[in-house]
Image (cartoon, coloured by chain):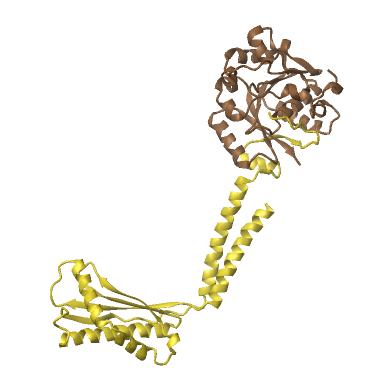
């Protein structure tokens, strides 16, 4: 898929190595790589609409541009965004693996060299319990073996915390807050909830800075 | 940060200014207190009976005539409008069985206020003694009365407005600080990475600028 073919607004900018935002994502990627033993990251946010999917895609593209093999997997089973952002279909993806069992590499596609995109696939009737399915977590673990980093575009933090099998199966959580829109009190409360649940909070991404 | 600081200082200054204005331009109010003790000849069993006794004596002794005399004696030198307000005359019943009257006057002149309280107390005692002398003794239980504590003129204080201003400025600082904290808590803008790290107590691994083509449908 060429960058010109990316029809979703904003995605071209995120995938373009010459984009002005690329260096910001490269800084984020370097900071993430400097942390020890991080092979999979759950990216979540205190509230919807703060740009979690953009951050996942931008981070994945930056890492791929740095020569890493990365996968970005859309785990928003009740409101998938990744395929829309890329202007792609959502016929197969993460949930297809539960039925097909061919491996997530098979249900995704490379947006740019080194960057595997896995959309959600057909949406299950109960997204919350689907996140808890051991088969799904196992499939993501298998994907880790072929990728340097697996980035999981997750639902909002409240929902992630209701699925301990999901968040407990990966190396850490990255919290995205919007610099202009996320209320400080909400962000603080979310951090408190994450720490109370003893998740490995890797850090915060401040999105939409002026 | 600058805005919050200005808010706190501004609220404190406004409060201090208002307090200083009222402190400097409003007449101070001084209060002087005298106490009169009453000793009933008959034994009174409980607190209710003692209080009823004092009220009975008061209703007989305190008349318009008494108040006119207090005003005439204490406020002779002052104009009628400068005479202290008769603020509080109330029965006094102590836990050890003693009864009496608390005579409290308030006014803008400390000496006049104390003088009025003392004259009132003295006249009250005189009239109670006169009761004992005869004409109303059949209706009112007999009692001995004495001025137990004379009122002393309250101390004038030129520092009072400043003390009030300082106190209210402190209250203003607290109020302004609380308002600033409230605004800070409800604020949704993050000034910089340091602000975010201090607020969230977590490292900021990246800052992403608001690029113009951001996807409006990115709800993730």
Q: Is residue B200 left or right of residue B101?
A: right
Measuring from the top left, give residue A153's x and y in whole percent. 68, 24
The N terminus of chain A appears in which quarter of the rendering? top right
- The total number of labels drawn is 0
Residue B196 position by quadrant:
top right
- B87 lies above or below B131: above
The residue drawn where x is 81% and y is 25% is A15
Q: Can residue B193 be seen in this view?
A: yes
Residue A92 position by quadrant:
top right
The residue drawn where x is 73% and y is 10% is A106
Q: Is residue A201 left or right of residue A11?
A: left
Measuring from the top left, give residue B4's x and y in whole percent. 65, 54
Measuring from the top left, give residue A66's x and y in whole percent. 80, 23
Q: Is residue A171 left or right of residue B81?
A: right
- B208 lies above or below B16: above
The residue drawn where x is 68% and y is 54% is B3
Camera-side residue of B155 and B118:
B118
Measuring from the top left, give residue B15's x and y in whole percent. 57, 65
The C terminus of chain A appears in which quarter of the rendering? top right
Chain letter for the part of the structure drawn in brown: A
Camera-side residue of B2 and B93:
B93
Q: Is residue A69 visible?
A: no
What's the colour of chain B in the image?
A: yellow
- B46 lies above or below A206: below
Q: In this view, does B154 lie to the left or right of B140?
A: right
Residue B8 position by quadrant:
bottom right
């Amino acid at each position: 898929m060429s960058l010109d073919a990316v029809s979703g607004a904003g995605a071209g900018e995120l995938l373009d190595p010459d984009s002005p935002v690329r260096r910001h994502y490269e800084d984020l990627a370097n900071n993430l790589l400097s942390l020890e033993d991080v092979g999979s990251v759950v990216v979540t946010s205190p509230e919807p609409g703060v740009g979690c999917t953009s951050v996942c895609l931008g981070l994945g593209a930056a890492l791929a541009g740095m020569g890493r093999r990365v996968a970005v997997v859309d785990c928003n089973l009740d409101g998938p965004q990744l395929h829309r952002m890329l202007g792609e279909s959502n016929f197969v993806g993460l949930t297809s693996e539960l039925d097909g069992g061919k491996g997530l590499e098979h249900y995704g596609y490379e947006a740019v060299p080194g960057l595997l995109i896995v959309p959600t696939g057909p949406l299950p009737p109960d997204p919350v319990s689907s996140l808890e399915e051991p088969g799904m977590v196992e499939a993501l673990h298998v994907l880790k073996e072929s990728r340097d980093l697996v980035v999981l575009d997750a639902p909002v933090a409240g929902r992630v915390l209701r699925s301990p099998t999901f968040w407990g199966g990966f190396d850490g959580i990255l919290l995205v807050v919007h610099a202009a829109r996320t209320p400080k009190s909400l962000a603080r409360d979310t951090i408190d909830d994450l720490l109370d649940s003893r998740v490995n909070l890797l850090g915060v991404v401040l999105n939409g800075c002026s | 940060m600058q805005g919050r600081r200005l808010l706190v200082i501004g609220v404190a200054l406004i409060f201090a200014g208002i307090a200083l204005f009222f402190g400097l331009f409003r007449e101070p109010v001084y209060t002087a207190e005298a106490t009169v003790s009453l000793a009933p000849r008959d034994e009174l069993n409980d607190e209710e009976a003692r209080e009823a006794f004092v009220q009975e004596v008061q209703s007989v002794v305190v008349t318009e005539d008494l108040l006119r005399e207090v005003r005439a004696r204490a406020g002779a030198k002052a104009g009628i409008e400068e005479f202290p307000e008769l603020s509080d005359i109330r029965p006094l019943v102590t836990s050890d069985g003693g009864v009496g009257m608390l005579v409290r006057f308030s006014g803008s002149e400390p000496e006049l206020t104390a003088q009025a309280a003392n004259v009132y107390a003295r006249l009250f005692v005189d009239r109670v003694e006169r009761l004992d002398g005869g004409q109303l003794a059949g209706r009112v239980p007999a009692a001995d009365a004495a001025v137990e504590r004379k009122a002393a003129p309250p101390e004038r204080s030129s520092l009072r407005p400043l003390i009030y201003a300082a106190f209210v400025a402190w209250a203003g600082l607290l109020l302004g600080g609380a308002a600033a904290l409230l605004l800070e808590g409800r604020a949704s803008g993050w000034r910089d990475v340091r602000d975010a790290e201090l607020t969230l107590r977590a490292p900021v691994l990246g800052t992403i600028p608001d690029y113009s083509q951001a996807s409006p449908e990115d709800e993730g």
